Amino acid sequence: MLEERQQQERGSDSPMCLNCKIKMEKTILKMHFPRGSLPVEGFKCHKCRDEIIDARTVEEYQHLAQKLGLIIVQPV
Ligand SMILES: [Zn+2]
């Protein structure tokens, strides 16, 4: 029998730092665009200060930045 897995998205699951193998802490980072920056929820390693932003969040913010005119989309 197939059971559909429920997606658990509670946001409490911190990713691991690939360098230090410790859990990263949730923090607010700044995402930079050609015409400005936006505050975005990301994670930071308190040991090596590596910062990461979830790929899906990056995508969302790229769309948002486009709407806000922070990214100039050039037709190819
Ligand atoms: Zn680290």
Image (tube, rainbow, N blue to C red):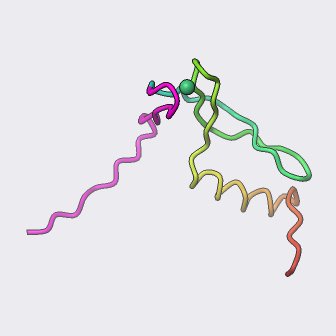
Q: Residue at x 74, y 39 (%)?
A: 39
22 drawn magenta: no
19 horizontally vs 62: left or right:
left
Extreme residue toward the right, this view: 35
Extreme residue toward the front, this view: 19
- Characterize the magenta stretch by its predominant secondary structure: loop
Give ligand 1's quarter of the image: top right
Q: Which residues are magenta?
A: 1-21
Determine whether 72 is above or below 20 in the image: below
70 horizontally vs 40: left or right:
right
Query: What is the x, y in percent for residue 10?
Result: 41, 41
Q: Residue at x 89, y 53 (%)?
A: 34
Quarter of the picture containing the C terminus is: bottom right
Extreme residue toward the left, this view: 1
Name the image quarter holding residue 60: bottom right
Query: What is the x, y in percent for residue 73?
Result: 86, 70
Query: What is the x, y in percent for residue 58?
Result: 65, 52
Quarter of the picture containing the N terminus is: bottom left
Extreme residue toward the top, this view: 47
Q: Residue at x 79, y 56 (%)?
A: 65
Name the image quarter holding residue 6: bottom left
15 drawn magenta: yes
Determine whether 4 is above or below 34 in the image: below
Query: What is the x, y in percent for residue 75?
Result: 87, 80
Query: How many marks are shown on the rendered structure?
Result: 0
Q: Residue at x 58, y 52 (%)?
A: 55
